[in-house]
Amino acid sequence: MHRYPRWPIHLILVIVSFVMLVPFYWVIKTSITGENIFNYPPSLWPVDPQPFFYVDAWYAIPFPRFFLNSVIVAGMAIVANLIINAAAGFALTKSFPGKRWMILLLLACMMIPFHATIIPAYLITAQLGLLNTHLGLALPAFSHIICIFLFKASFDAIPPSLIQAAKIDGVPEWQILLKIMLPLAKPAVATNIILSFIWSWNDFLWPLIIVRDVDMQTLPLGLSTFLAYFEDTTGALYAFCVMVLAPGLLVFLLAQRQFIAGLTSGARKG
């Protein structure tokens, strides 16, 4: 029973949500009107909307090729993240010598920005002969420490008696992880999928360094190629941005509930 009215909180949340959505609305409006962003006063509603800017963005550059490259790289990153992060999170639920130091080492590594490790990452990728390849594009995104701890928090919430019963029945460790732990940690799986997809989908710096051919460019890198074709076409530029953002928003909306549950699973346990 609430002792105070909830509507002021809801009103504030609606206003904040509206303010947060204004930039997205402005991008979509500009993508169908081509309105100059320096017009004053700006129009709040779309004037003479039409979809031709999307057609220009699709045919002016090899957009399907860039899109396919991004899908392949994101797919490889998602699969690798699920396998590596789930195995690492499962290992951290065990008791072993040096576990505390291992966790501290992982936490310390989170403080090192990717830019500080980009030179050794490039040299390793070059030695492996993976420059200008899909595998080379996805390799640095194969695991994220944040996702490892998300899996660990979800696995810690599973009753240990369930794992002990499986061990008594002679189930091997990898089957315990695959058939028992992962099905019970769906929020962590969804969170891993969303985060690894968005991080690999939006990555610009790493593809800029290792890609040599236009056919291997991903969508964020293709944006620079697009700007070389259309320097003064505001509508086509915004249409391209909407087409790049749409898959990420769609993935997030489809798994929004599981994503929030995955991020708060550790908090609920505490």
Image (tube, grey):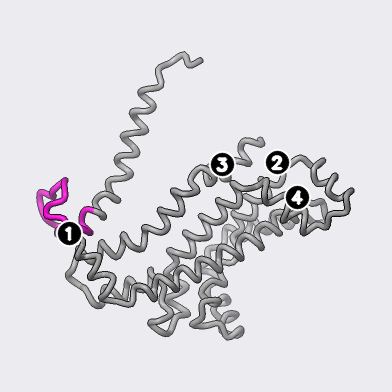
Q: Looking at the picture, does residue 155 appear above or below residue 65? A: above
Label 2 or label 4, whichever comes before in sequence order: 4
The residue labelled by disc 3 is 261
- The answer for how far apart the CA atoms under marks 1 and 2 are is 51 Å
Label 4 or label 1, whichever comes before in sequence order: 1
Label 4 or label 3, whichever comes before in sequence order: 4
CB under 8 Å between discs 3 and 2: no
Three-letter amino acid code at the position of disc 2:
Ala
Label 3 or label 2, whichever comes before in sequence order: 2
For residue 93, the mark is: 4
User: Is residue 149 rendered to the left or right of residue 212?
Assistant: right
In percent of width and height, residue 78 lies at 56, 62
**Near-viewer residue (93 or 32):** 32
Q: Residues within 10 Å of mark 4 (few under 14, many from 20)?
A: some
Magenta segment range?
Answer: 29-49
The residue labelled by disc 2 is 157
Residue beneath the point at 43% across and 16% down: 4
Residue beneath the point at 67% across and 57% down: 86
- The answer for how far apart the CA atoms under marks 4 and 1 are is 55 Å
User: Is residue 37 rendered to the left or right of residue 152?
Assistant: left
Judge whether residue 44 is colored magenta.
Answer: yes
